[in-house]
Image (cartoon, rainbow, N blue to C red):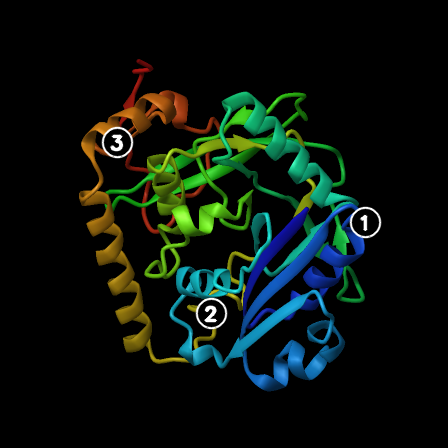
Amino acid sequence: MKIFVSVVSYRDPLLHYTIKSLLENKSERNNVTIGILEQTAFDDSLENKHKEIIEDQCIRYKRIDPQYSEGVGWARHVNSLQLEDEDFYYQIDSHMLFDKHWDRNLIKNYKMGVAKTQSSKVIITSNCKNFDLNANNEPQKIHVNSVACKAKYYAFRKDMYLFGHGEWVQPTTDLTPAIHIFAGNFFTHSDWVRNVGVDPYMFFEGEEQLLTINSYANGYHLFHATSIECYHYNRTHNYITKQSQMPVVSSEILNKRVSKARKHFLMVLDNLDEDMLERFRKYSGVDYINRKLEKRAITDQILPVPGEIRDWEIEDRAD
């Protein structure tokens, strides 16, 4: 089988580790092509520092200077256009590590979803385990035990942004239905790019919400994997890969991009069919119509709410 891995990177010094981990840990059973859109200055780029990576025949590489980036949705949309005849689309973050045969596990889980739903419209998504940098500034896995995940939410802000948390649980023998797509670790048939695709207008916040609701509206079945085979960098809260950290454009340009994305996000939500939103509420416990979370959709863990205090309303409905 052929897998297209989409990796967009914004000024990420760990990108080369991600690419090497993908290639070193893939199985011999599948052909993996990695599409890269690097948004960084030439001096800091793979093109300059790790030319052997972009010269590999399985790499499709593009680069722009970071000031021209229109955000993560735009970058992932552009990068998805590098997809050719691959069977599967795998979207990841630029600071990740992988376990051996990550590709075989994803395809196995996808096939389980197809058998369960009798449909090719299956998405496999999970959060990740973690890695950090050791004393030599090299990646080191810090959570190596086998786990799976169950995503719930810890905030439904008044501005309509939801914030998800992937609770670690014991590995499972069957797929777990998911109510949230993790944009940095999701795997599906490549038809998804044509049927749904990444919304190019989302700058950062709201990206995963639209991935989830647009996929659900187009008939996709969402599942968490039976086990997590990847690791995410543990220190990304105020990391340079966020455009608000050490910005390369003025605050005026940055604010304009954020405002444009927010208006688009609200417009998409306002135009969604109410019957579909009610079906999604019954499925997930996320009530976009009444702007509430039902108790079953809320994580038991207390987490900080970005930007303001926790402000949801809770309902016990599960009909």
Instruction: For the residues labelled 1 and 2, say whether their Cβ atoms are less than 8 Å apart.
Output: no
Label number found at residue 103: none
Which residue is under mark 1? 28
Relative to 133, 45 lies left or right: left
Q: CA distance from mark 2 to mark 3?
A: 35 Å
> What residue is drawn where x is 28% and y is 37%?
311
Instruction: For the residues labelled 1 and 3, say whether their Cβ atoms are less than 8 Å apart.
Output: no
Q: Earlier in the sequence, mark 1 or mark 3?
A: 1
Q: Earlier in the sequence, mark 2 or mark 3?
A: 2
Q: Position of residue 134 (x, y in %)?
A: 77, 59
Secondary structure beneath disc 2?
Answer: loop
Q: Quadrant of the C terminus?
A: top left
Secondary structure beneath disc 1?
Answer: loop
Secondary structure beneath disc 3?
Answer: helix
**Which amino acid does the dot numbered 1 rest on?**
Glu
Which residue is under mark 3? 277
**Which amino acid does the dot numbered 2 rest on?**
Gln
Q: Quadrant of residue 40?
A: bottom right
Which mark is nearer the camera, 2 or 3? Answer: 3
> From the viewer's perspective, is residue 290 above or below residue 257?
above
> What residue is drawn where x is 63% and y is 32%?
109
> From the viewer's perspective, is residue 116 above or below residue 53?
above
Which residue is under mark 2? 245
